[in-house]
Amino acid sequence: MNGQTEARERSVPTKVFLQGKVSEYISRCIECNKCMDACPATKEAFSIHDLNEASIGGYSVPLEIKEFAFHCMQCGHCAPVCPKDIRRDHLMLYLKYKLKEEKPWAYRRYLFIKGPKKTGINRIIQRLFIGIKKLTNRDLAGSMETTPEKKTKVLFYPGCYIYSTKTIRLTRRLLDHVGCSYTVLGGVTACCGAPHLLQGEFDQADRCQQLLYQKIKACDPTIILTACAECFEAIESIKKTYKMDVEVLSVAQYLLRYQKMFPAEKIRGKILVHDPCRFQAQSPQGVAAHEAVLRFAELVEPPRNQPSSCCSQWNYGNDQRNVLRQTTYLAAVKDAAPTLACNCLTCYEELIKTYTDVEIIDVLQLFEESLDSIKTGEKK
Ligand code: SF4
Ligand code: SF4
């Protein structure tokens, strides 16, 4: 679901753009309820008419709709089923914007340290966080919160996930292996703004994107790589907004260009790909993940009538049925394959927290394991 790209492909502020979309969408809605039938989030009884009305600026929001808005995980499952081509997920974003002063603590906590130019207590906590991370990860400290200034061909943009250190070390090893000369742009002060956007904090999201654009422009890359679907979508949005001549790729897409530099042997048995809401299976990034699994393992098709596979990150645990949905999904995965390869770092980080006997891996791990398989072979 390409949410940010459509929502932000213009020069007006997000809140103004979405405000216009809200009235347009609501005037088209035939109240057929198909969007809600497809929605996996927990909701009490309310009518589409009430939901539409609550989305309009100036109208009050009933309690059951407030609760639903904070359960909404921005998965986008409501959009493709709409016969009137309405983005219910964008209407929900606007509702979150309306309710931003009433956000639950789990929402607020997530943004505490993310973003540039923090002030007051947030700034102190952000600095402490960065200091501790640099101290405990000295090998990566030089890539944390830096502002690259020299021109580079390839920019590896991990944004906030620079602190997912296992993935960063793994990605760096793989990029080094294929001989890629790259610059890293990572850190909470270089946040892509997706976490803010997905909470309806539109002004903060716009600010993050403006500053990130300036940082990208300073090193003027021809290729930008990222392994997070939200970062990817934000970079695509920056590219369109500022008309940048740059290729945006997932790390898996990039590595597949150099697949001859990895051993040809299969190293794993059955694996199912976890397709994130924002990198669907048919997207170039989704296709790359499936190709990578096929390259190193036995690719298994997802079960028919697969339950909601959304990792639920973007409601921050606010819907008590998150765990039930994830457990049901992983039980269906288990029937098909023992291993689930995630094609987005957000999904990976969220799903590994689930209690399950399914092995959850990052799809990039397969590239690394194939390199390790050479060493193991050599030792034997
Ligand atoms: S599916 Fe579309 S037309 Fe039907 S209620 Fe939802 S938004 Fe309205
Ligand atoms: S984006 Fe929100 S409203 Fe739409 S299906 Fe997902 S949880 Fe439901």
Image (tube, rainbow, N blue to C red):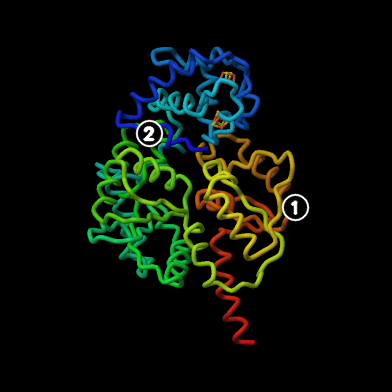
Q: Nearer the viewer, residue 291 or 12?
A: 291
Q: Type of residue at label 2? A: Arg
Rendering coords of residue 151 (x, y %): 25, 60
Q: Is residue 99 above or below residue 301?
A: above
Rendering coords of residue 153 (x, y %): 32, 61
Q: How many marks are shown on the rendered structure?
A: 2
- State if disc 1 and disc 2 touch (CB < 8 Å): no
Q: Is residue 297 above or below residue 44?
A: below
Pointer 2 residue Cβ closer than 8 Å to ligand 2:
no
Circle 1 — which element?
Answer: helix
Instruction: Give the side of residue 243 with respect to residue 158, left or right.
Output: left
Residue bearing mark 1: 336
Instruction: Give the side of residue 235 with respect to residue 41, left or right.
Output: left
Decide which of tag 2 and tag 1 comes sooner along the chain. Answer: 2
Label annotation for residue 8: 2
* Mark 2 closeness class: few <14, some 14–19, many ≥20 residues within 10 Å: many
Seen at 55% across and 72% down, the residue is 262
Seen at 48% across and 18% down, the residue is 25
